[in-house]
Amino acid sequence: MTILVTGATGNVGRLVVDELVSRGVAVRALTVDPERAALPSGVEVAVGSIARPGTVPLDGVEAVYLAPYARTASRVCELIRESGVRRVVALSGSSVGDEHEGSSGHDFAAVERAVDAAGLARTFLRPGAFMANTFGWAEAVRERGEVRSAYPEAVQTSIDLGDIAAVAAHTLTTEGHEGRTYVLSGPEGLTMRQKSEAIGAALDKQLSFVELTPDEQVAEWMAQGIPATIAGWLIEGYAQVAAQPEVPTGVVERLLGRPGVSYREWAKANAAVFG
């Protein structure tokens, strides 16, 4: 059984490769930059991208991990159907209902529509906020010992990238997931302030929490290079979870038979980034 992993240098795709290799599965990894990917030995490397559908190598492939790329999703899904691939696991997101132009939800919805329009045997994975998103705090933590964020009491059930990859590998290699949509979360809901405290505990130091207004938060994101449209829907998302706290879905635990990685565990594992 050969599984094609698209976006194999992506933040989730690279981890999916490792998860599949650990299961003894034959992996074909699609990437534009094989050297940067540092892929494990034994992985078949294919140079290309789902942004260029003609480079997607589907011969002999039985299942596909589909990274989210809306612009060419329809054509890629047509090629997958024509090749006779048995199973597709598509990475989407919990923001799929947000159809604002430029939002991640808009693109996720387009990918899901393309998969279903092609009539593929599919599983959708819809993770929420990534724990890794808080790497954006790292510079202020290192330089000033502070975390800067709007909506300090907003509760998110952030998820570890490794848990998303583990679920992807599980659904690619086991039965019973066709037609299912899995909303993935971390094991607990934490406020922004509690995340700050977890990072401080991992560093064994007291961090200051600086509460920003929504406008100040957007300005800081834009100063970090985040486009205004994306910063806009990000702050809308913060406002939503401030008004309606997220609740863990328990799907990771149910599918994998183990607890998901907690934010505190993640902070300890990544303390060097913040220190």
Image: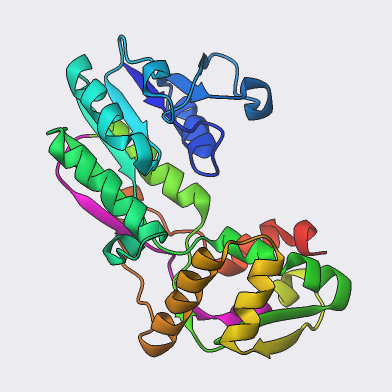
185 on left or right of 17: left
User: Residue 68: where, in percent of width, then height?
Assistant: 39, 43
| Residue at point 56%, 24% (across, down) | 32
| Residue at point 59%, 59% (across, down) | 132
247 on left or right of 16: left
| Residue at point 67%, 60% (across, down) | 225
Q: Is residue 189 visible?
A: no
Image quarter of the N terminus:
top left
Residue at the right extreme of this rendering: 143
Front in this rendered view, residue 22 or 193:
193
Height in image: 225 above or below 172?
below
Is residue 119 magenta-colored? no
Front in this rendered view, residue 216 or 136:
216
Residue range of the region highlighted in magenta in the rendering:
175-197
Q: How many numbered marks does the figure carry?
A: 0
User: Residue 209: where, in percent of width, then height?
Assistant: 71, 87
Q: Is residue 219 visible?
A: yes
Height in image: 68 above or below 4?
below
Is residue 183 magenta-colored? yes
Height in image: 38 above or below 152?
above
Q: Quadrant of residue 176?
A: top left
Image quarter of the C terminus:
bottom right
Height in image: 209 above or below 273?
below
User: Residue 147: where, in percent of width, then height?
Assistant: 72, 79
Q: Quadrant of residue 3?
A: top left
